[in-house]
Amino acid sequence: MMTRFTRPLALAVTALVTPVAAQDLVAVRAGKVLTGTGATMENAVVLIENGRITAVGSDVEVPWNAKVVDATGKIVAPTYVLAHTPGGLSGGNEMMQNVPFLTVQDSIDPSSLFFEESLRNGIGTAHVIPGNATLIGGQGMVVRPFGKTVEDMTVVDRGGIKLSLASGRGASRMAQMRKLRNALDEAVRIRADLARKKEEFEAEKAAGAIPADKEFEEKADKLKQPIIDLLEQKITGYLYVPSAAEVPEVARMVEKYGVRLVLVLGPRCYKAADQLRELGLPIVLDENAIEYTERDAETGEETVVCQAKVLADAGIEFAVGVSESGRAAERYPWWQMATMVRHGVDPATAMRALTTVPARILGVDAQFGSIEVGKVANLQVLTGSPLAATTWVETVLLEGEVVYERSKDLRLQLLFGGSEGEK
Amino acid sequence: MIIRNRTALRSLPIAPALAALALTLGLSAQDKVTVFRGAQVHPVAAAPIQNGVVVVAGGRIVAVGGADTKVPDGAQVVDCTGKFLTPGLVDAGTTLGVDGQDLNEQGEEVTPHLRVVDALDPKDPRLARARRGGVTTIQVNPGNRNVVGGLGAVIKTHGDTVAEMLVQDESGLRLTMGSEPSSGNRAIRGGTPVGIYYRRPTTRMGVVWEARKAFYDAMAYQEQKTVPEGDPENTGYDPGMEVLVRALRGEVTVRTTARAEQDIRTAIRLAEEFGYKTMVEEATEAWRVVDDLAAAGIPVLVAAPSQTAAPEGADVRYHTLNLLAQKDVPFAICTGADNIGMSLAREAMFAVRHGLPHDRALRAVTLDAARLIGVDDRVGALAPGLEADLVIWNGDPLSPTTKAEAVYIRGQEVTP
């Protein structure tokens, strides 16, 4: 796995704001710091060196040569992390159902409005991965919503592989499960075949039929390799589970194939809360799965169920997604968190579902998700509480660099009627 | 359809049923006095009251005041300490309560005689959904597929029968500008006209002409009505024409759906041409026409401020409502025709996010909405004499972390 943090930080350039030359030393003066670990600091300074946080606290002095980001009277929080989103892809769902070899690298559109919106809404890291409508949809990658090319944006170049138990295009659930098992069984066979061939090769080599300096070189079909990687836990499967009915199949998959999975839960999963807790797999609530309106088939009566609340009450940790569609309130992290809080989830848990938990699921928690010494300086300056509708993201820093300023957000200004050149 | 006796059409069993209902409600609720105490009360028509008291009897509000408001002995007290109390929200433009299939009668493109009240389904789960979001009164409109779509209705969001729910059986005449009434229509190019899609109009010009023709016909009809009955020149009663004539006389408001600037301008022009009373509905690009709207005194119904895209390629702007407020254009916020999964309180919340003052946003989904649909003498505020439609919220109703805890319609708890 290659991350951008194994390489020197690239100077990122974007059309949205004038690039600020990367300074070694940046100090953010905050009215309040929400560290994301539960701690809150009033009138604190976040000190950043070479894109990493080197000090946080009320007693931190601002060095004379530091570039200062003034957030006095405002709230500084970690940028949000999305553990799973098909946003920013030019077509997130491949029609062919078994395409493990595809990667979003070929589909991410850096100029997509999704990334612009993400930055505007305080999202700093996103695992972009194919949608829920393909059986084996391909591989994702972790990006930041900033940069002109996919390479600029790359945080982790190989994310998870997307699997889905949602039966699509007229297929039955039976067929969907069967197809997924078939794909996995096929990979098991390929692996076994290769192992057997290698054994035979070594035996012949030992017997002198093959020169001693020759190595076994046969490899699996490249198109199938990602599934073999999944079996070998070299890649994590992000499995979409549309409803509670599919949860037992998840248990069987884990047991039979030993695959490492992250579950992306659809809106109708809450009834399997106990099984999910037993499984202990990391969980992402899909963008539309926080709140679910269930209709009684007999009476037609509707009940609103907050899956996040059910999971939280069952002691299950989870991340949540945001909508990639520009038309829904669910595209806003504040709305998603507020929805959970509206249903009784405590605000800290709601906040974690978009910061530390997704960072841990993605395996990038050493870098992202909270404001702590040693972590990458991905910060957002908010005008108020992260849960309030009236709060706006004022500034976003990624790797210590200011990459978004509301005062320079031309699209937002246009939406507010400013700089309206009548065309 | 020709009905000679006008009263035959008008005296559907709704009115007596309503009266009977009021009677039963009145009788059963008259003795019972309910007092809502301790909430932050937002009467909307007056300043908010901390630790307020609202007294309800006989399905109506009797008193609204501070903690020292006199309450009768033996009244049932609802403790609202720490809660917010507002009037039930009023959605001035929806299609709730009517099956999507039933919104657009496609037999003709001008159907002023159709009444949405005839397609209302009290069991529509979306009504309970609206109620769950604190909405107690809604204007239901016919769809936008016809140039003249018919008459809307104002109903409460709770009731076993339409009669029970009804506030106004005929409210506003639906007129649609833009491409919606022509979308899907096919021009007959040498082929045989089979199927309803081979119909007129097929362009914006055609849409406006159909509207104009309808009103010309109504004017001609009105003149013809002066011919004595029995005279062969008198062709008799036409219910559709009757509705249009009522619109021309200003007795029915023409609700013109117009999203793009050009369509809003057409809406203003047509209203001036024929002198009818109109409001512009779903007016996405009202921000481009705000001065003309102000000059013409035409109210605006803005649909779904949370949305960043609108039909007809109309450009959404976040400052639309602020502009309307500045220029004194009367307006209300509604969920609109495309209201799947929407909540009116949330739409008002987005208006606040976009800079509309909080009290103004709350008014835009209560009193101002009621005013726009002509029912502010019954609902839309907490004031003595008005119907006791109220909502208890666990916080500021326009905050995303708040939900409606209890909903009352005419003094009865109807929380879903």
Image (cartoon, coloured by chain):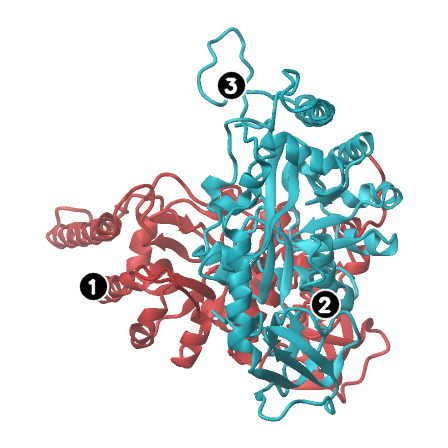
Chain colours: A red, B cyan
Q: Amino acid at mark 1?
A: Lys
Instruction: Tell me the SS state at disc 1.
Output: helix
Do the residues indicated by labels 1 and 3 lie within the same chain of the protein? no
Judging by the rendered image, the residue that carries numbered circle 3 is B198
- Per the model, the C-alpha gap separating discs 3 and 2 is 49 Å
In the image, what residue type sits under mark 2?
Answer: Thr
Mark 2, chain letter?
A
Element type at marker 3? loop
Q: Please tell me the numbered disc located at residue A390.
A: 2
x and y, in percent, of residue A291 in the image: 47, 66
Choose mark 3 or mark 2, whichever is in front: 3
Percent across and percent down for residue A95 are 38, 39
Query: What is the three-letter code of the residue carrying label 3?
Result: Tyr
User: Could you say which is closer to the camera, residue A107 or residue A243?
Assistant: A243
| Chain of the residue under label 1 | A
Q: Residue furthest top?
A: B190
Q: Which mark is residue A256?
A: 1
- Same chain check for tags 3 and 2: no
**Of callouts 2 and 1, which one flags the residue occurring earlier in the amino acid sequence?**
1
Residue A333 percent across, percent down from the top left: 60, 65
Q: Is residue A254 left or right of residue A418?
A: left
In this rendering, position of residue A327 left or right of residue B264: left
